[in-house]
Amino acid sequence: MTVEHPSAPAEHPSESPPGSPSQAPGRTAAVIPAAGRGVRLGPGAPKALRTLNGTPMLVHAVRAMAASRYVSLVVVVAPSDGETEVKGMLDEYEHALPERTEFLVVPGGDTRQESVKRGLDALPDDITAVLVHDAARPLVPVDTVDAVVEAVRAGAPAVVPALPLADTVKQVEPQPGGVPEPVVATPERALLRAVQTPQGFERATLVRAHETVPATGEGATDCAGMVERLGQPVVVVPGHEEAFKVTRPLDLVLAEAVLARRRANDGF
Ligand code: C5P
């Protein structure tokens, strides 16, 4: 899959960016589910609205998607009671976002799966490729975003960025109330990958997955898994260590350290 990076911003948003060997004509959008409460991070505002070095995590995530010249629309799925706040936030940070990118804000649902579905429902007809990116991964580098889009535009119905694991993983049989959990399997580590976002999809494939895969329990935490259940191929491209998910308090410290290093290196 050799694909050139577009050399200039798309001047006509209804077309694919120059230099893109797009097989499917049309635009690429990013849907950012940002409606989670983020309880594992401790008490406070919804996770996406918390700040990293003074800027809301969601703004970092939006900027990371908009940094890709392939992405001409970003749909933010806001907490259902936070739509106005998110719109205000995007207005406030408009100066930090590229002019060529359109933004939409829609209210989220009770699960990530439902929130993504609401984002998909808001897409205009000319969108043919969709990224789904967790607001909780604010620091994904643009090269990773581009690599995902390029793989979709080259014909893959579903693409996930992923990294090999540092830890060995055990499958256990969960037990109630702190009882030690018996190990039932040790998958071969070399065959495992830790999956990140943005995940990229041919739009029709992702829409079909959301229409046909039922939401069970907490719903799907991974759109690519829904596509797998359709029997469609999902491929992996290299992820990036800076695309980690901000989940626990220590992740906030790490994220701020990454931002400090970027600022020292390139003034961002
Ligand atoms: O909870 P978790 O970290 O898996 O959430 C992943 C992403 O899904 C987060 O960006 C979160 O804001 C989003 N989410 C959502 N709607 C929900 C639950 C989670 O948009 N109801």
Image (cartoon, grey):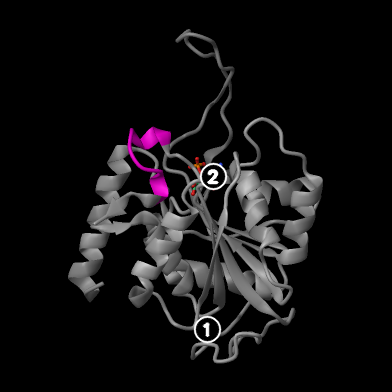
- The one of 164 and 120 positioned closer to us in this rendering: 120
Which region of the structure is painted magenta? 39-48
Q: Quadrant of the C terminus?
A: bottom left
The answer to if 152 sits in the magenta stretch is no
**Residue 190, numbered label:** 2
Residue type, mark 2 in image: Ala
At x 56%, y 73%, the residue is 73
Left or right of 9? Residue 224 is: right
In what element is the residue under mark 1?
Answer: loop
Q: Is residue 265 above or below residue 140?
A: below
Q: Position of residue 52 (x, y in %)?
A: 28, 54
Q: Is residue 228 above or below residue 148?
A: above
At x 76%, y 60%, the residue is 205
Tell me if the residue at label 1 has its CB under 8 Å from ligand 1.
no
In this view of the protein, can residue 162 be seen by the observer?
A: no
Left or right of 96? Residue 147 is: right
Q: Position of residue 31 (x, y in %)?
A: 57, 61
